Amino acid sequence: MAYQMMVTLSDQEYAALEAEAIKSGKQPETVLHEIMARQLHSSLTTETTKRPLTASEFMEQQYREGKLLNIPTRRGLTQEEQAELERLGSLFADSKPLSEMVIEDRGPY
């Protein structure tokens, strides 16, 4: 659907529009339409950027800026991943709890 409007310009405004049209090799109406479309598009994008980011948008922005290595998902671990995690846990586990190792490392009082 297309709409038609009548626009009233002063002599200075029309002269500037005509100079821009001559420079670009287009009709003044076409140049005016392009200017309006550009302005409306930029005002729409600034309206959407003024709202606060959602949590997922914030994480995506941080990922793009290189501040996050990956974007977390809410999926659970597969059986293979769970088994690998348990295997690594038992591989690096020691017989003593960490709290006891810290007490031993303190030495005598």
Image: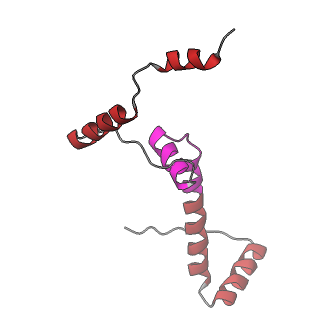
State which quarter of the image contains the C terminus. top right
Secondary structure mostly seen in magenta is helix
What's the residue at 23%, 43% (across, down)? 80
Q: Position of residue 74 (x, y in %)?
A: 33, 37
The residue stretch that appears in magenta? 43-64
Q: Is residue 96 above or below residue 85?
A: above
Residue 76, visible in the rendered structure: no
- Screen quadrant of the N terminus: bottom left
Report the residue that reaches farthest toward the right: 12
In this view, the residue in front, 73 or 31, is 73
Tell me, what colour scheme is on the image? secondary structure
Give left or right: position of 32 versus 3.
right
Vertical placement of residue 62 versus 39, above or below: above
* Residue pictured at 62% horizontal, 82% vertical: 28
- Farthest residue toward the left? 79
Residue 98 location in percent, x, y? 49, 21
Residue closer to the observer: 29 or 84: 84
- Report whether residue 43 is seen: yes
Toward the top, the furthest residue is: 109
Q: Is residue 49 left or right of residue 86?
A: right
The magenta stretch spans residue 52: yes
- Could you say where residue 49 lies in the image, as x and y percent from the top left? 57, 49
Image quarter of residue 2: bottom left
Task: Please say if 47 is above or below 78.
Answer: below
Examine the image and state in which quarter residue 29 appears.
bottom right
Location of residue 72 in the rendering, given as x and y in whole percent from the top left corner: 41, 42
